[in-house]
Amino acid sequence: MNDVNLKMGPHDVGGEDSISIDINDHEMTHFEKFANALRIVVSSKRIITLDELRYHTEKLGDDYFKIDYFERNCLSLHKICIEKNIYNLELFNHVKNKKKSDFQIPIIDLPDTSEIHHLHDGKEHTHEQDDFQENETGEGPPDYYFD
């Protein structure tokens, strides 16, 4: 029997060779914080269970590997909400299209950090390194983002 046939889903990778795991802590993006908070709220209010979320996430098949962790959670949550008639797909698409058409990203020029001089604790301070950090890609919300 082929080992692939024994797999239960894309999550079932026990014993397989893989690339090394990045164990560095990376700051969460705004979307990741939002997605995590949403999952916490809907599970604490018993709208969904963690088992339901995991079940739908594992059913993503090959898409499981194409999207990040928080996107998988949101996509699974979206499918659960439709399945449970919390909202319907027609309403969702209407709201999504409205949000996408209204969404604007302000474009601003960030200053050259080497030219910034100001005081910290009464002492002259310059920015020797680039400490302006953008966590967002500027591509707008994912298709399943709703507010």
Image (spheres, rainbow, N blue to C red):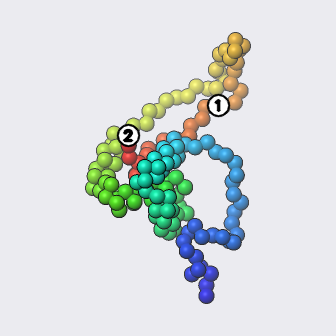
Badge 1 marks a residue whose secondary structure is loop
Q: Position of residue 113 (x, y in %)?
A: 64, 26
The reply to whether residue 32 is visible in this rendering is yes
Which is nearer the eye, 112 or 21?
21
Q: Is residue 53 left or right of residue 22?
A: left
Name the residue at the top extreme. 122
Give amino acid for label 1: Asp
Q: Quadrant of residue 22?
A: bottom right
Q: Quadrant of residue 11?
A: bottom right
Q: Closer to the N terminus: mark 2 or mark 1?
A: 2
Q: Residues within 10 Å of mark 1 (few under 14, many from 20)?
A: few
Q: Is residue 74 above or below residue 51?
A: above
Which is nearer the eye, 113 or 63?
63
**Proximity of marks 2 and 1: CB atoms separated by less than 8 Å:** no
Q: Residue at x 33, y 39 (%)?
A: 102
Q: Position of residue 77 (x, y in %)?
A: 43, 56
Q: Is residue 122 left or right of residue 145?
A: right
Residue under label 1, please give it.
131
Q: Residue at x 57, y 81 (%)?
A: 5
Give amino acid for label 2: Phe
Which is nearer the eye, 102 or 120?
120
Residue under label 2, please give it.
103
Q: Residues within 10 Å of mark 2 (few under 14, many from 20)?
A: few
Q: Quadrant of residue 14?
A: bottom right
Q: Position of residue 97 (x, y in %)?
A: 32, 48
Badge 2 marks a residue whose secondary structure is loop
**Mark pair 2, 1: CA separation:** 27 Å
Q: Position of residue 137 (x, y in %)?
A: 52, 43
The quadrant in which the N terminus is found is: bottom right
Q: Residue at x 39, y 37 (%)?
A: 104
Q: Residue at x 60, y 35 (%)?
A: 133
